[in-house]
Amino acid sequence: MAAQRFLIVGAGLAGAKAAEALREKGFDGHITLVGAEEHRPYERPPLSKGYLTGKSERESVFVHQSGWYREHRVDLRTGAEVAAIDRAGRRVRLADGSHLDYDRMLLATGARPRELPGAPGGEKYLRTLDDSDALREVLATPGARLVILGAGWIGLEAAAAAREAGLSVTVLESAELPLLKALGPEAARVFADLHTEHGVDLRLGVDVEAVSGRGVRLADGVHVEADAVLAGIGAAPNTELAVQAGLEVDNGVLTDAALRTSDPDIFAAGDVANAFHPRYGSHIRVEHWANALNQPAVAAAGMLGETAEYDRLPYFYTDQYDLGMEYHGYVGPDGYDAVVFRGDVPARQFIAFWCSRGRVLAGMNVNIWDVGDQIKDLIRADRPIDAARLADVDVPLADL
């Protein structure tokens, strides 16, 4: 293995953790980690949370200290973009015309924000460290008016940060509730109330017609003035390289449970990977930190010829104002038939369970901690649980 060349394309969290996992597993060959950004690998959650609000130092966002890559013999190339993959020749061409050879490759190219069609170009996005720096400047401007398009996780976290900074914030969302697709109407209402209580002008069921330097014009002709507009309308996986290389692609790069693509020498992890999940019997692509953190160890095992499967339950979290939340599980395309609340919903201290035929599919703990393992146990048990007992705080979760 010492003579082998492993190439990791994408120098974000997933790419950095893959390099780390390879070295921890004893791989002594050559590792090249290539990233288009000028920064060394960093984590994205702080960009809309602690770093954006100024509660976390800049250095805290990076995956490793600057000397780690040299110390672990990882050839980190920042500001370098892979332009094409030559699978037959086992090499890639960079945008500057140079080439890199590989024996095994990991695609960790992540995702990018969906852009506003027809926008003039002055709108802001929140995906990169540079994006977060630009938004921090807006948050530091006294009296600034921020309009956010989209009430998803990024939009709401940015709204919370902006309100805490004293900005006037308007959130425009086409759905009838924020996070409706992610949580359903029962739990989404919690976040609608949270933001209106904190002074956000939350406008639901509205359509944006145009964005200009002065603000946003809605489809009904109403103009919303803004000093800055932030677009948070979703993300798209960066699959261009995979498509060019002829790999199987469908809402991301398709992989098996070992994170191996349709080419046995190419793996994928993180936001770009649409991985087969053994528990659900289908492919799942999750755009959250936990996949980028945990999938690389499985991909590294596969690259080294070991047997491993990625079977962790999907997980994500958020922090908004005084609300902290963790979500475990996956509802799936068949949906759910009930949401069972356990605790004090108005006080925002509760657990919500999404159920189907009495079985727990997913659980969300809000301002209640150290219950994640118990929630995951209920999901993995995959058996009917009495809804009344599930909702009863006097019945320990471990006894259900």
Image (spheres, rainbow, N blue to C red):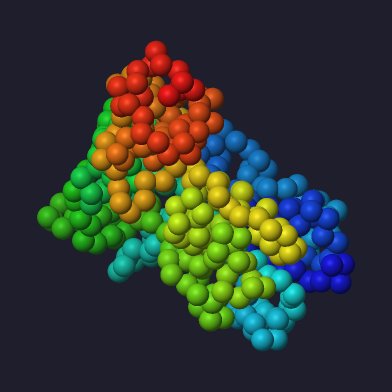
Task: Tell me which corner region of the image, top left, top right, bottom left or bottom right, holds residue 245.
Answer: bottom right
Specify whether 47 is left or right of 153. Answer: right
Total tally of numbered discs in the picture: 0
| Residue 8 vs residue 382, the one in the foreground | 382
Eyeballing the image, is 93 above or below 4? below
Q: Residue at x 56, y 33 (%)?
A: 55
| Residue 393 vs residue 78, the one in the foreground | 393
Estimate the x, y position of residue 80 in percent, counting from the top left: 66, 70
Q: Residue at x 48, y 50 (%)?
A: 279
Estimate the x, y position of residue 94 in percent, counting from the top left: 66, 78
Q: Residue at x 47, y 72 (%)?
A: 249
Eyeballing the image, is 148 above or below 15? above
State the residue lying farthest toward the bottom.
88
Estimate the x, y position of residue 205 in percent, counting from the top left: 18, 48
Residue 36 in view here: no
State the residue lying farthest toward the front.
383
| Residue 319 vs residue 29, the one in the foreground | 29
Eyeballing the image, is 364 above or below 210? above
User: Which quarter of the figure is the N terminus placed in?
Assistant: bottom right
Specify whether 214 is left or right of 290. Answer: left
Residue 2 in view here: yes
Specify whether 303 is left or right of 242. Answer: right
Specify whether 208 is left or right of 12. Answer: left
User: Which quarter of the figure is the C terminus placed in?
Assistant: top left
State the residue lying farthest toward the left.
220
| Residue 389 vs residue 44, the one in the foreground | 389
Q: Residue at x 26, y 49 (%)?
A: 173
Task: Tell me which corner region of the image, top left, top right, bottom left or bottom right, holds residue 397.
Answer: top left
Estimate the x, y position of residue 252 in percent, counting from the top left: 47, 66
